[in-house]
Image: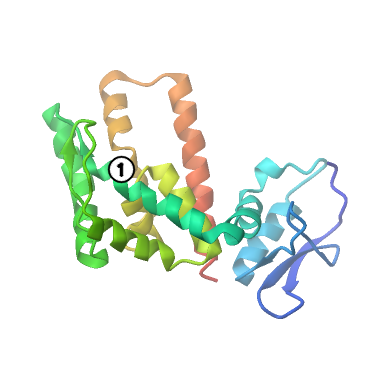
């Protein structure tokens, strides 16, 4: 659709709880027609900046924060239990638990990048996960899975939306929780999540398709990191 507004700004929500994004002074709604009310002014301002940056045709793909906010309101909030179960389920097959059998350099790199965060999960979250070699599944202790689920359940709909994006992007619930709890930087989390891919690229090189896929994933994760950051206000 063509840009139909002159100005994009923010204002307090009608009920005073949260912030609205305003186009020509009118509060916008989500695709499901719900009021787009976000918890922090910083997030509302960041979304307004996305709208202000549109010229000619409005391109939703260029507004990732708007998309994530709408997801939180339209899809996550109405089905919190299902989303919590989906995210917590990543603990059963967390990337960090599946180690290579070789070569030694890769094995050592995985230990260096991954083991500190499994140790962190055991110490800080009470979730001591087991590791295995190769792709054979390992059954995780029920008490560890319960502890991970408890950590996921502590988040509201907006933070769950951010966590979901990080966990699916990393392939690791542990890395996602560590970033959400500010124990791990986004840069180091990406490095850990891409450990295997980086090693293979160093050894064999990369093709254009694989490189484009990684860049697309990195862009999505970067947008999610920003979404989580502005949720802090």
Query: Can residue 181 be seen at all in this image of the molecule?
Result: no
Q: Is residue 175 left or right of residue 23?
A: left
Return the x and y of residue 172 as percentages of the image width and height: 34, 47
Q: Is residue 199 left or right of residue 104?
A: right
- Disc 1 target residue: 93
Q: Residue furthest bottom?
A: 16
Query: Can residue 161 be seen at all in this image of the molecule?
Result: yes
Instruction: Look at the image and tell me in which quarter the N terminus lies.
Output: top right
- Write the residue at 73% across / 74% down: 13
Instruction: Look at the image and tell me in which quarter the C terminus lies.
Output: bottom right
Return the x and y of residue 16 as percentages of the image width and height: 71, 80
Res 12 quadrant in image: bottom right
Return the x and y of residue 120 as percentages of the image width and height: 22, 60
Return the x and y of residue 203 as percentages of the image width and height: 25, 22
Would you place residue 126 above or below residue 117 in this image? below
- Write the residue at 14% across / 26% down: 103
- Write the residue at 51% across / 67% down: 156
Mark 1 nearby-residue class (10 Å; few <14, some 14–19, many ≥20): some
Give the secondary structure at mark 1. helix
Q: Residue furthest left?
A: 104
Q: Is residue 46 left or right of residue 219?
A: right
Q: How many marks?
A: 1
């Amino acid at each position: 659709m063509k840009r139909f507004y002159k100005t994009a700004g923010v204002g307090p929500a009608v009920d005073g709880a949260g912030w609205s994004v305003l186009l020509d002074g009118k509060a916008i709604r989500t695709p499901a027609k719900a009021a787009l009310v976000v918890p922090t002014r910083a997030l509302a301002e960041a979304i307004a900046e996305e709208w202000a940056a549109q010229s000619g045709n409005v391109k939703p793909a260029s507004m990732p924060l708007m998309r994530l906010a709408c997801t939180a309101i339209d899809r996550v909030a109405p089905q919190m239990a299902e989303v919590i179960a989906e995210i917590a389920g990543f603990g059963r097959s967390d990337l960090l638990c599946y180690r290579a059998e070789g070569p030694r350099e890769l094995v050592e790199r995985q230990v260096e990048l991954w083991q500190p965060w499994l140790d962190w999960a055991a110490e800080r979250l009470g979730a001591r996960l087991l590791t295995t070699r190769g792709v054979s599944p390992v059954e995780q202790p029920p008490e560890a899975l319960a502890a991970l689920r408890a950590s996921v359940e502590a988040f509201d709909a907006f933070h769950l939306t951010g966590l979901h994006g990080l966990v699916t992007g990393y392939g690791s619930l542990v890395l996602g929780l560590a970033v959400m709890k500010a124990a791990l930087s986004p840069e180091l989390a990406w490095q850990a999540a891409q450990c295997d891919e980086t090693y293979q690229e160093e050894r064999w090189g990369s093709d254009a398709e694989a490189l484009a896929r990684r860049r697309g994933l990195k862009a999505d994760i970067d947008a999610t990191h920003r979404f989580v950051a502005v949720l802090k206000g």
